[in-house]
Image (spheres, coloured by chain):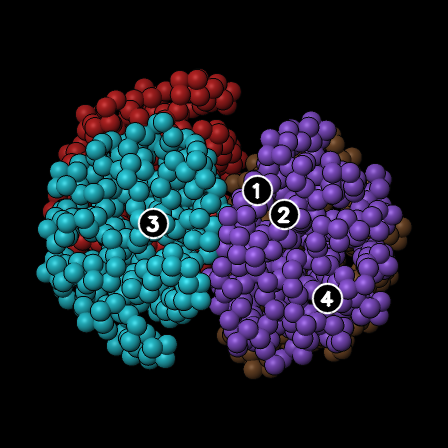
Chain colours: A brown, B purple, C cyan, D red
Amino acid sequence: MERIIGLINAPFTPFTNEGKVNTEPIPAYADMLVRNGLKGVFINGSSGEGYLLTEEERMMLAEAWMKAAPSGFKVIVHVGSTCVAASKRLAAHAQTIGAWGIGAMATPFPKIGRIEELVKYCEEIASGAPDLPFYYYHIPAFNGAYLSMLDFLKAVDGHIPNFAGIKYTFESLYEYNRCRRYANGKFDMLHGQDETILPCLAMGGAQGGIGGTTNYNGRNLCGIIEAWKAGDLDRARELQEFSQDVIDVICHYRGNIVGGKRIMKLIGLDLGPNRTPFQNMTDEEEACMKKELEAINFFERCNK
Amino acid sequence: MERIIGLINAPFTPFTNEGKVNTEPIPAYADMLVRNGLKGVFINGSSGEGYLLTEEERMMLAEAWMKAAPSGFKVIVHVGSTCVAASKRLAAHAQTIGAWGIGAMATPFPKIGRIEELVKYCEEIASGAPDLPFYYYHIPAFNGAYLSMLDFLKAVDGHIPNFAGIKYTFESLYEYNRCRRYANGKFDMLHGQDETILPCLAMGGAQGGIGGTTNYNGRNLCGIIEAWKAGDLDRARELQEFSQDVIDVICHYRGNIVGGKRIMKLIGLDLGPNRTPFQNMTDEEEACMKKELEAINFFERCNK
Amino acid sequence: MERIIGLINAPFTPFTNEGKVNTEPIPAYADMLVRNGLKGVFINGSSGEGYLLTEEERMMLAEAWMKAAPSGFKVIVHVGSTCVAASKRLAAHAQTIGAWGIGAMATPFPKIGRIEELVKYCEEIASGAPDLPFYYYHIPAFNGAYLSMLDFLKAVDGHIPNFAGIKYTFESLYEYNRCRRYANGKFDMLHGQDETILPCLAMGGAQGGIGGTTNYNGRNLCGIIEAWKAGDLDRARELQEFSQDVIDVICHYRGNIVGGKRIMKLIGLDLGPNRTPFQNMTDEEEACMKKELEAINFFERCNK
Amino acid sequence: MERIIGLINAPFTPFTNEGKVNTEPIPAYADMLVRNGLKGVFINGSSGEGYLLTEEERMMLAEAWMKAAPSGFKVIVHVGSTCVAASKRLAAHAQTIGAWGIGAMATPFPKIGRIEELVKYCEEIASGAPDLPFYYYHIPAFNGAYLSMLDFLKAVDGHIPNFAGIKYTFESLYEYNRCRRYANGKFDMLHGQDETILPCLAMGGAQGGIGGTTNYNGRNLCGIIEAWKAGDLDRARELQEFSQDVIDVICHYRGNIVGGKRIMKLIGLDLGPNRTPFQNMTDEEEACMKKELEAINFFERCNK
């Protein structure tokens, strides 16, 4: 199977002020991502408020991204939901419209507590798009699925034909590396925390990753990988440190889904509000965040 | 607003062996519940695998229960989901078909960590069925929404016009009672743990409740309330102890959703398998569970 | 073995303003407890900041309480610590000075995650005072030892000769009752949450208990049991509700160890500050707490 | 203040078979550590079962290590306990006997939930040894003190005169790096997870660290830093991967305190059993562990 090389962006979902899905900004959004070095998108995931969308909205978004994506720009569709039948339908739809791949995080309800449950869940969904690579999206802080990913790889190996790898959004670089080395690197371990790309590269990982702050800071995050490859450790460090500073700011404003989405407006690509139950930032909060970003010269260095 | 008096049952969703929703057993199911003293149903909730159903399936089930319910038998429709728009549609549908009320637990994704988020979430959903009482279903073990229910009552009071009360499925009888006494008992606090009906009655609560083990043990659980009212404490204790013994058995078999649903087959109302990611019991496990139930004379005392 | 009937108080440890242990108020403290219906004390536990005392201080306190206790007033010494050898020494000391019994909670370090570890821990400590009844103090919110108490009883039964029962400070009245009924009531299940004495009585439990808010609200908490025995449910409810209101207040002021200890000063028995790392209440906070207590007429109804 | 360069080992505490502290192996232990590249010891910490020792035992061990330590070999004494007065005494003792520094983790009881509590706790202990550098040992998985270390640094800065830095035993390399960069690197951030030395080096950290698996795998762990400095990334990776494989083995045998301590016996330095409540490995488990270690050629590469 083809490996993902470089960074994929997890886009936010554009809404109108009334809260309807708004596909209008997507072509400009895709252009901006390409311009800043991103290799594709992982849509309808956590940054994209995928769980807060209806099935029809998710399909509509997938189609809009397929239309907007230039040749070679990968569209991976997150199809996870609490309802396997719906997820399978979304997987089939992704295959039909020619998406590059699909992914799913563990359902948050019921909370998954056993490897076998997770395997069954992934297997049924993956079977909906048998021709596409399937990525498991590991983000236990969001769904409580604190399972050993090494045991999971052992369990899916040879069992789910189109299983491609894991989007690993968890702090343990130890476990990440153990998974990366499993069966001589059989599976594609996508790094999923923008704050630790450089340390992960040092271990041999992070050749491919999926980012959330890449939406507005992709050029610097892509720059870490380039600098590392070029042997310029000082530059890689500086870029990683800057990226950590950016993350530090959004952590003051309810994280990437809320704070990060509002940054898009500040860099000229207004994507509208968040859906309930997210609490949208107030104008006052936006002004404060802007100041914090200015203090680190963000607007001179961000995606353009 | 009318108070719920007595026990409401949270039914399992019948599936065919192929995993399709099967409305065929519902009339017999409703009859059995009435016969055993239940006052209504809370459908499409956690026992009903509501989150694992599509929107269409949830509506189909609501219609089937409305058709099967005899006069005066309350049908409350759980409409919670990760997508507020879908929940609001389900709420509107419930009102259209004449359901008695609606309910929603907190979305498990994103995990709700603030009272204001929960209020917003409930408010939007409740507005879909303005003529029906709305119950918040508090079950933090399932969705991580460990919030103060007293603070929540204060926040919704005067804010959500059709807010009726809470289905309280958590261990703190202290908090339960604080909520019950809030504003001179303004809200309807439905007791939601079958293992502690008697202690709750002693405090003055549990006049109304929603049970999960009432599916097969309803006559004994209803019996606790009757015995208490009749001043027969010994009988109330014996029935509560028996009910705890039953719960002890299902805890050995992955709880009510899996183990309890299989008991229905053992008492003659086969409701089919569970949906992914639940792991269905094996025949061997079923045989073991049957023995444990026989050891406490369950089959002589259960719903019939 | 003798059962504990009625309520035992878990006293605070008196300190001088300089933070030294101060045994001077203990005789008056004991008198006050007797006067308000308490049947004994469980010293050096969580309310007594036992873990924050040196071994010598713990012994000194035990001796002071033994000296102050009138005939028939039970002195139970909590001897748990992170160091089993020290705990065993404290147990032997308790036996030597004629204490009525001993108790120990699970060590918080290392966090106990297996029944066998807990059994071994209790066994070694209990062996230090072979002639005294040993109570396990279950308070998992404080030490993370979330283990099944029913499985624990099965494991200690026949294994620790002087094992007497459990001080059960956890919300599950279901598990409490299962333990109470184990082996026809073989072990003494002491109720350990003042907020739920009445509901527990209804189930047949709470004949004996150990309280923390009994320090200042003991007469009302003892009154719940009396009213229940006298068949006066209305009075039992009123007293339980009042006691919940009191607990509600201390929850606003960092709980019983900090807020509750300061109430002692307000009712005329100043026990000094808390030890580091507890943050003592400011005078301003004290004034606010006093107002909240006045609002529920606490000072007319409290221990005197 | 002097920075720690290189790796410090957290030794196990030698016990006789009867469970008494055994200082006899300490000189040979110290020699072995020096021979394998370690720069000092952090004694009486979690690997050393410090919380399970009496105050006298802790002092005796500190003296034995001081006696055994060759010139320039740093002895850092962990003095944390649940009793601040005892910790302060241990701190003073460490200073008296000429230890290089002291450290303390947050008390596990009461669980520390606020920065101010932690600052107070550290301040009082650090004041016991005003001439020695004080390190806070951050290991929230063991004591539940999940606090922001960046906020903690801000709070201690200028407040605790001998505060030197943090032994950081947590997965977030993001937070580690934020702390490392605080106030232009004002504080000494000791890396505390042997599984991620290489990634941390890449970010600019891990110049100094405190290891637990360094007891038996120190030469390879020290080798990572050497290889990195020498620009030999391939060798650094191989050594880090080997070290992860070793950690993987001990994770199958209750971790470093139990499994790791038994490895010492396998490499010729028997340190005796663990204290209650730890469950010592059986001979059978030891044989299994040995096989797993042989399978990765551990005994050819380990400390000698």
Circle 2 or circle 3, nearest the eye = 2
Distance, label 4 to label 3, CA atoms, is 42 Å
Along the polypeptide, which appears first: circle 1 or circle 4?
Answer: 4
Q: Chain ID for label 4?
A: B
Distance, label 2 to label 3, CA atoms, is 29 Å
Which residue is located at x 83 percent, y 38 percent? B17
Mark 2 residue crowding within 10 angstroms, few (<14) / some (14–19) / many (20+): many
Q: Chain ID for label 2?
A: B
**Can residue C120 be seen from the camera position used here?**
yes
Question: Position of A182 compared to D258: left or right?
Answer: right
Q: Dot 3 corresponds to which residue? A: C208
Q: Which mark is residue B220?
A: 2
Residue A201 placement (x, y as % from top left): 57, 46
Q: Chain ID for label 3?
A: C
Identify residue type, mark 1: Phe
Residue B26 placement (x, y as % from top left): 83, 50
Question: Position of D9 compared to A20: left or right?
Answer: left
